[in-house]
Structure formats: structure tokens, C-alpha cells
Image: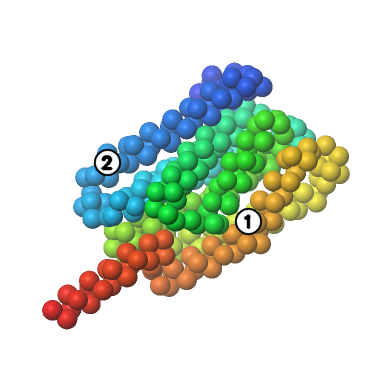
Amino acid sequence: MGLVEHIHPSIAEANFELRSVQFKFIGASFAFFSLVYLASMILSSTLKTYRNLRTKEKIFWHLAIVRGVYGVFCIIIGTWALFIDTELVKDVVYATTPTSHFAMTTTVGFFIFECAMILWSDIYYKTFNMLLNLHHWLSLVGYSLLIYLGSTHFFGTRGLILEMSTPFSCLCWTLLKADLANSFFWKANQFILVHAFHLRSVMEFNMWYLTYQHWDRIWEAMPTAMFVPLYLQLVLVTFLMTPYWTYKKTVQMINPVDWNFEDSNKNKTENGDMKKSN
């Protein structure tokens, strides 16, 4: 029995080979994450910490919650792919399962939502985070091609485990905004987060090892349109993104500063110094 049967039997019975079915699940995923964002707006308004945030920080707050929910989903799918699935490994290029289809369409729906919000935010606030944009747009392109070509679900599902750091990263930021950086809970979460990034590196090199194991099949059958974004993304996360984020989160564990809104930190420090002088 696959994982999706435990979610809802109708998912396992869906014909994911049809474009209409794929678009239906992608649309449902986009709608779900949009509703999570909306629910965050409604529920967070009851929190004093949230009400004290600037508008841009409130948007980031909601996105953190959406990303955290998606991160939990990825941990579940990634764990299934690594330790339970026995079908995808039979053909690392073209094998698919209802669970892998569900995971891939859900992921594309999330990244459509995510990239749309990032694009809107960057245009409206005239900001640009190159690593974040590069990672998310490449992910959107890669997973979209994966669905379109019906290929590489083996690596696609296993790659989701790299989002294991996301829920802890989101919690880290929200706790910072709540002025709980000195609490035991924040320090414990940050400790887990840093080691989650260490485990990301382990899994990334495991992906390279799996590539080595199945290289003949990959070279023979994997479409070039799938090969290029897959290994471009893998090179970037292995040798640039994960090491950089591991370093930043380790520094943040020692010096709890929100570098996403450094001007806000500066203003808070200046206001604190002014109060002391008064």
C-alpha cells in the first residue's frame, strides 16, 4: 500500500498521466497553500507580536508559516521515499507511483505560490535575494519539467527531504520576532536547525552516490531537459547554498540577529539606546 492511500484512496486511483488531472492537483495545491496564508493572516492578527511588525515583516511571517507547512509535507514524503518506497528504485529515470505524482504536483503548486509571492514582494519593495530566487525558480522549473516529461520521480521525491530544515528555519525567524531569542526553546530549535543543515549535506552527497550507482541508466535514458536542471540544482545546493546557509545559521545561533530585516534590527537597537539615555 502506498502512502497516498492513507491520505485519501481517490488520490491513488487518479490517472496522473492525464494533463487535466495534473493541473487539477497543481491547482488544488496552490489553493491549499493560499488558504494557509489566509488562515495565518486571520489567526496571527490576535498576537501582539504580529501586530507590532511592519507590513513587509507580516508578509514574511505568513510566508514562514506556509513554508513550514510545506516543509513538514516534504519531511513525510522524503522519509517515505528513502525508507519505505520500493518501486521508484526499479527505474530511477521513468518509474512513477501515485505517491510520487501527488508529491510532485503538490510541490509545483507550492512553488508557483512561492515564486509569485517572491516576485510580487521583490517588485513592490524593490528588493532581491539572489540565492532565494535562484533556488525557488530552479525548483519550479525542475519539478514542472519532471511532471511534463514523466521522468526522475526517484530523485524528485528523495530531493524533498532537503526541506527538512525549513520548519525549524521558519520557527527560528518567528521566535526572533517574538523576542524569544534567549529562550531555551529558541536555542534548542536553532541547534536542531544547524544539524538539519548538516544532514542536508549528507543527503546531497547521497544523491551524488545514487547518481554514481545508476549512472549508466541515467546517461542512457534521462532526457537532457531533465538532466540539466537536476544536476545544476544539485551542484548549487551541494557546493553553494547549503554550505552558505549552514554558516549563516551557525552564526545566528551564537548571535541571534534577523539579517532579513537588518534595518529593523538597527532601528530597534537605536530605539533601545535612546530609551537608555533618556
Amino acid type, residue under disc 2 in the picture: Leu
Rendered residue at 58%/21% (across/down): 21
- Crowding near the residue tagged with mark 1, few <14, some 14–19, many ≥20 C-alpha atoms within 10 Å: many
Q: Is mark 2 on a helix, strand or loop?
A: helix
Most foreground residue, 144 or 83: 144
The residue at 48%/65% (across/down) is 249
Point 55% across, 37% down: residue: 107
- Residue sticking out furthest to the left: 278
The first of marks 2 and 1 along the sequence is 2
Secondary structure of the residue carrying numbered label 1: helix
Q: In the figure, 99 relative to 182: above or below?
A: above
Residue closer to the observer: 261 or 171: 261
- What residue sits right under mark 1 in the picture? 237
Q: What residue type is labelled 1?
A: Val
Residue at 32%, 64% (x, y): give it: 264
Any part of residue 20 in sight:
yes
Q: Name the residue under label 2.
A: 43
- Rendered image quadrant of residue 44: top left
Image coordinates of residue 176 in percent, x first then y, are 34, 61
State which quadrant residue 269 falls in.
Answer: bottom left
18 horizontally vs 226: left or right? left
Image coordinates for residue 111, horizontal then vertical, percent: 52, 40
- Look at the image and tell me in which quarter the N terminus lies: top right
Against 216, is 90 above or below? above
> In screen coordinates, is 118 left or right of 244?
left
Q: Residue furthest bottom?
A: 277
Q: In x, y percent, where is residue 114?
A: 48, 42
- For the residues labelled 2 and 1, the Cα–Cα distance comes to 34 Å
Specify whether residue 258 is in view: no
Residue 124, numbered circle? none
Crowd rating for badge 2 (residues with CA inside 10 Å; few <14, some 14–19, many 20+): few
